[in-house]
Image (tube, rainbow, N blue to C red):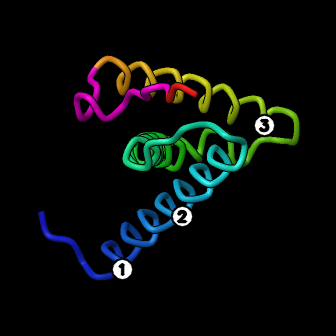
Amino acid sequence: MRMNLPTLVSILRKQSLYIALAAVIGAVFWAIGMPINPLTVLLYSLSIGNLIVPVTERLEPIYAHRPFPYNWLLFLLILLVDCAACLSHINSNRLVPGTLTHSRSRT
């Protein structure tokens, strides 16, 4: 498989967006006092982003040109099915054993 430069730039741009979102999500969890594992947040953000975004982009012709209420209903239905499939895949495989669980700190 040969990739041209615009495709590679697009992929890297999306990955940097997912990493930035992981940093924001980790900061929010940390700010509300939850113990976080930065590797867990990063892995989940990258895997969820890489599984959901290509599917929704691929299925965009289904919902993009519909009138107002139907385009959102179709998009949300696609997103719901995609998220359910994505999360069941991630939770069933456990990407890196031992890193996707949190240990509670005892205070």
Q: What residue is pinned by disc 3? A: 72
Where does the image place residue 106, in percent across and percent down from the top left? 52, 25
Query: Are the two marked residues, 1 and 3, in contact with CB atoms closer than 8 angstroms?
Result: no
Which residue is located at x 78 percent, y 37 percent? 72
Distance between the Cα atoms at labels 2 and 1? 21 Å
Q: Identify the element where label 1 is drawn.
A: helix
Where does the image place residue 107, in percent across and percent down from the top left? 58, 28
Which residue is located at x 67 percent, y 40 percent? 33
In front: 75, or 50?
50
Helix, strand or loop for the magenta stretch, by majority: loop
* Residue 20: numbered disc: 2
Above or below, 101 relative to 24: above
Quick one: which residue is furthest to the left in this view?
Answer: 1
Which residue is located at x 22 percent, y 28 percent? 97
In front: 23, or 92?
23
Distance between the Cα atoms at labels 3 and 2? 26 Å
> How many residues crowd mark 1 within 10 Å: few (<14), some (14–19), many (20+)?
few
Query: Are the two marked residues, 3 and 2, in contact with CB atoms closer than 8 angstroms?
Result: no
Highlighted magenta segment, given as a residue range: 93-104
